[in-house]
């Protein structure tokens, strides 16, 4: 089917690849397709004509020579065995060809029989060599062990063979494990069924020459999977032809008498909950404190699959219904850079908002939900609607807030909503998988942990050990680490899996002893035993009709999960498509991507749900699904060929863009991810840019850096064409803004971004395009207090402005940089002149929209000009005359300019009013500075103030000036 997919891709019609594959259409069938067939496939008329023309051009011989493969290729983790007949060349020289033929036939038959017994497969016979593998087409949790056992049995079986001359024969066997591509390999008219491509078969073939006759050797890749299942003797590290690094090799000497079969094969990938009495009691004690108004946060840490989610479910179920309210936030590995994704998803669920709802319906639902926790619905709704990307239309006026203001007010609204709910009844807040939380969500959680102190709120937060919670150690925060189960709890978990039906004692003992209390192993091994056909249910218990075969813990979780998927082979492709979409997916999206009818798709999903691979919420077609474990999704996804993944990701991206436009608008980074994985650089670039710009609007700088950084990386891989340069410049400027917002003006990363932007702007002479770069470099120097570079930049910018005398933007930037430089150098007269001219330049722009664009892209804003301008006007009072009418006018001008400052500039107004208060004398410029001034500069790392401070003589105003400097620093008035 890969050939038909490639053919469709060449035509630009890759979106039909899945439909053709699902209907068994290969290149050989193409010429027989009719209009009725195209109708049933849902091919559009124009696309149909395009296909028919291409079919007519196909070589008929090539079509006939391209039969459909019974097994599409897959990426699999296999254990490969290579078996070689010792001394076959010398033996063939001594024997009659017919006798040698009989030896080879018996040798192959014996090997094949043993391999088949262990559910392995013979890939091919290579002379007197045999290549076999374990784990395909059906995986097992113990494929490495099966391969070794098969090798030992092959040696025993071949040892019984004799030639007609009564000569004995022997074999040597090598085993290696690793990632391979397995499937039918078709080339022209020749084909090889279930061919293997990868390092593992090559390593196994090379290692067999190191084995002695009658010995099995294993590579390091297999040794890691075996643990203590066998007695192994190290043969050291050996050079292997074709492999760059020496490989550690072991010889298998037999089975040990070890009581713990699985000590070395234990893995962190486990699930399950049972017992946990001490943990439950501890958490309930925190809940009692919380319900008394002493808000508590319980941090639940544990390795993947240890049962974090289950203990949360147990705690939640133990609370009497109706006595509290529950709020759940689910973090996602696909949204680690999506600002406030857990909160957005929770709000949509709580309000019952559906994608097909009209904007007015969404607003109605949102208002009803918000009314449960606040009486200020008209104030809060526009903020939350903006967060959810719901247009408010005429119902609410535009917010008119800066990104930073909107961010702060949105945080406050969300926290107030939570507090409002808690004022009515206790609230249980569940935050799952916090290790996948985005940076903005973690910041909001920081505030929430502090906010709940005096409220009846219990927060349960789960995460993996690699995550370091910033809240650990706070008075109202407790840490709960989950450990493995004891034998009693392991037995209880087995009984839960069997729904109370008792297993045979021998089987129960093996499961308990060999799982070592890892919940995932217990659950998965028990399910596998129940599905194996070994058990017969009688009177509420299971019995064995045949001897119990050896059981094993899954060698890796990958093998275990692939075993579960392989048992559902007819519907495995649905799981793979869902895995490509993500951990969670809706029925509607899956249907659009898979292209299957409702009956077929619903049946496939029901099987996956019944097998507990998927969890469902809702009823189709409004249902949504999630993989029960992230690792199930990973196993399904990793089994796809990279080329198949690319096709799927392209199709998913197309569907999201064309059919789920609202979802794409809210989370453009998801669309960008799929197009990136599809290898569509230019398309992905546009979506990453959109995601970055959206994050910037929300002041979600960490997310903006991630999104725009990916856009920059993709852009770097595209050819440098003149038409792309202006787009590269805009992208780099946006990236610089994001770095500036997160790391600061003078951070090396920020400066590097502006440096690169300047390279892209080398042939640009547009003041509007150059303004962000110029101000970026200037602000970096300003932050460091580097007056000399500031002067150089200001002079260069002024020179550029003189070349564009008709550009208000160029004048604004030039006058502002010159004014600020003069101000910090203590040249207040020059500063006032330049800044007044910059201020006046705003009035000369005929089209205010140009300045609006400047506001969005430049660190120079109206209030940023008025801020130092107002202070400079006050500073320029050096004599008695200045204390008269002229001085009063200057002070009034300073007050007026300060009143025009917006947002945080209100703090500046207070500082200015404090400075121009009539009961204080004016400072006199002059050399020297008070010790308190210098101390404040050092305290706040404001070397840029050194020039201004140095121009003042010590006197009774030094402490007052330093106090103002202290206020200005704390209120982040500078730099811009």
Image (cartoon, helix red, strand yellow):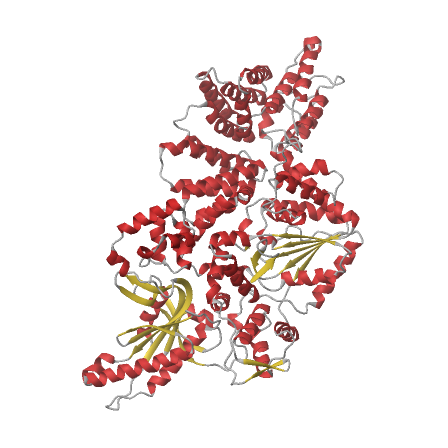
Left/right placement of residue 909 relative to residue 800 reads right
- Residue at the far front: name it: 36
- Residue at the far right: name it: 292
Q: Where is residue 695 in the image (x, y as percent from the top left)?
A: 56, 39
Residue closer to the observer: 355 or 328 = 355
Q: Position of residue 357 (x, y in %)?
A: 61, 44
Point 59% across, 38% down: residue: 698
The reply to whether residue 240 is visible in this rendering is: no
Q: Quadrant of the N terminus?
A: bottom left
Point 53% across, 37% down: residue: 693
Residue closer to the observer: 954 or 198 = 198
The reply to whether residue 129 is visible in this rendering is: yes
Q: Position of residue 238 (x, y in %)?
A: 34, 69
37 is higher (above) or lower (below) than 694: below
Point 52% across, 45% down: residue: 660
Left/right placement of residue 228 relative to residue 937 reads left
Q: Quadrant of the C terminus?
A: top right
643 is higher (above) or lower (below) than 239: above
Q: Where is residue 333 in the image (x, y as percent from the top left)?
A: 54, 53
Tally of numbered discs: 0
Residue closer to the observer: 57 or 187 = 57
């Amino acid at each position: 089917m890969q050939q038909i997919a490639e053919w469709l891709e060449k035509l630009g019609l890759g979106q039909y690849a899945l439909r053709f594959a699902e209907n068994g259409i290969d290149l050989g069938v193409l010429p027989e397709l009719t209009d009725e067939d195209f109708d049933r496939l849902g091919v559009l008329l124009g696309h149909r004509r395009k296909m028919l023309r291409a079919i007519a051009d196909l070589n008929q011989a090539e079509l006939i020579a391209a039969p459909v493969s019974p097994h599409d290729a897959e990426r699999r983790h296999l254990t490969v065995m290579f078996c070689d007949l010792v001394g076959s060349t010398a033996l063939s020289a001594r024997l009659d060809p017919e006798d040698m033929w009989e030896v080879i036939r018996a040798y192959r038959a014996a090997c094949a029989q043993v391999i088949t017994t262990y559910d392995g497969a013979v890939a091919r016979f290579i002379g007197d060599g045999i290549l076999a593998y374990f784990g395909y087409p059906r995986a097992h949790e113990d494929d490495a062990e099966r391969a070794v056992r098969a090798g030992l049995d092959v040696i025993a079986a071949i040892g019984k063979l004799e030639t007609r001359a009564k000569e004995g024969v022997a074999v040597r066997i090598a085993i290696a494990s690793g990632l391979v591509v397995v499937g039918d390999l078709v080339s022209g008219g020749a084909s090889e069924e279930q061919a293997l491509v990868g390092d593992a078969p090559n390593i196994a073939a090379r290692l067999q020459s190191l084995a002695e006759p009658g010995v099995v050797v294993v590579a390091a890749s297999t040794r890691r999977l075996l643990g203590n299942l066998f007695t192994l003797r190290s043969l050291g590290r050996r050079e292997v032809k074709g492999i760059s690094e020496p490989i550690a090799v072991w010889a298998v000497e037999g089975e040990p008498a070890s009581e713990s079969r699985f000590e070395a094969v234990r893995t962190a990938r486990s699930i399950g909950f049972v017992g946990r009495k001490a943990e439950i009691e501890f958490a309930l004690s925190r809940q009692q404190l919380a319900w008394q108004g002493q808000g508590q946060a319980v941090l639940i840490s544990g390795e993947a699959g240890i049962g974090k989610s289950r203990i949360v479910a147990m705690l939640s179920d133990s609370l009497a219904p109706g006595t509290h309210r529950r709020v759940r936030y689910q973090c996602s590995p696909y949204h680690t850079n999506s600002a406030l994704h857990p909160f957005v998803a929770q709000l949509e669920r709580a309000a019952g908002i559906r994608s097909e709802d009209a904007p007015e319906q969404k607003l109605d639902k949102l208002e009803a939900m918000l009314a449960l926790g606040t009486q200020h619905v008209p104030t809060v709704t526009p903020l939350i609607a903006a967060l959810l990307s719901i247009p408010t239309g005429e119902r609410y006026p535009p917010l008119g807030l800066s990104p930073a203001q909107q961010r702060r007010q949105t945080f406050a609204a969300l926290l107030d909503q939570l507090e409002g709910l808690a004022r009515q009844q206790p609230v249980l807040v569940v935050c799952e998988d916090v290790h996948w939380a985005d940076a903005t969500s973690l910041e909001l959680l920081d505030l929430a942990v502090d906010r709940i102190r005096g409220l009846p709120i219990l927060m349960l937060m789960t995460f993996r050990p690699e995550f370091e919670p910033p809240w650990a150690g706070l008075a109202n925060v407790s840490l709960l680490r989950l450990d493995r189960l004891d034998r009693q709890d392991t037995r209880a978990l087995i009984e839960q899996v069997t729904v109370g039906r008792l297993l045979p004692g021998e089987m129960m003992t093996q499961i308990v002893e060999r799982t070592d209390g890892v919940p995932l192993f217990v659950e998965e091994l028990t399910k596998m035993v129940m599905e194996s056909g070994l058990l017969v249910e009688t009177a509420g218990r299971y019995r064995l009709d045949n001897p119990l075969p050896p059981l094993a813990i899954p060698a890796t979780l990958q093998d275990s999960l692939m075993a579960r998927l392989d048992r559902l082979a007819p519907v495995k492709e649905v799981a793979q498509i869902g895995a490509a979409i993500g951990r969670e997916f809706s029925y509607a999206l899956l249907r659009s991507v898979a292209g299957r009818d409702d009956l077929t798709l619903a049946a496939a999903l029901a099987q996956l749900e019944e097998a507990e691979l998927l969890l469902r919420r809702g009823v189709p077609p409004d249902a949504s699904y999630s993989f029960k474990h992230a690792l199930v999704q990973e196993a399904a996804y990793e089994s796809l060929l990279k080329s198949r993944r690319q096709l799927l990701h392209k199709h998913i991206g197309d569907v999201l863009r064309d059919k789920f436009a609202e979802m794409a608008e809210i989370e453009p980074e998801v669309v960008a991810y799929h197009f990136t994985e599809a290898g569509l650089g230019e398309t992905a670039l546009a979506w990453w840019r959109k995601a970055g710009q959206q994050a910037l609007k929300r002041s979600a700088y960490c997310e903006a850096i991630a999104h725009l950084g990916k856009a920059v990386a993709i852009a770097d891989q595209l050819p440098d064409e003149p038409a792309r340069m202006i787009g590269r410049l805009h992208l780099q400027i946006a990236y610089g803004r994001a770095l500036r917002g997160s790391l600061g003006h003078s951070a090396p990363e920020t400066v590097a971004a502006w440096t690169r932007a300047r390279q892209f702007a080398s042939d640009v002479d547009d003041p509007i395009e150059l303004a962000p770069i110029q101000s970026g470099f200037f602000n970096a120097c300003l932050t460091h207090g580097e007056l000399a570079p500031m002067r150089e930049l200001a002079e260069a910018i002024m020179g550029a402005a003189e070349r564009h005398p008709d550009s208000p933007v160029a004048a604004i930037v030039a006058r502002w940089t010159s004014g600020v430089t003069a101000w910090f150098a203590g040249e207040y007269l020059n500063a006032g002149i330049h800044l007044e001219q910059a201020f006046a330049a705003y009035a000369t722009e005929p089209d205010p929209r140009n300045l609006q664009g400047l506001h969005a892209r430049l660190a120079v804003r109206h209030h940023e000009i008025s801020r130092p301008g107002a202070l400079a006007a006050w500073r320029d009072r050096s004599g008695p005359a200045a204390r008269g009418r002229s001085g009063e006018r200057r002070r009034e001008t300073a007050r007026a300019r300060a009143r025009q400052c917006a947002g945080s500039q209100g703090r500046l107004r207070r500082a200015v009013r404090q400075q121009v208060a009539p009961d204080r004398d004016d400072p006199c410029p002059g050399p020297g500075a008070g010790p308190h001034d210098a101390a404040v500069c050092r305290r706040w790392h404001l070397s840029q103030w050194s020039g201004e401070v140095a121009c003042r003589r010590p006197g009774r105003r030094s402490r007052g000036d330093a106090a103002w400097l202290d206020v200005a620093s704390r209120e982040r008035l500078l730099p811009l």
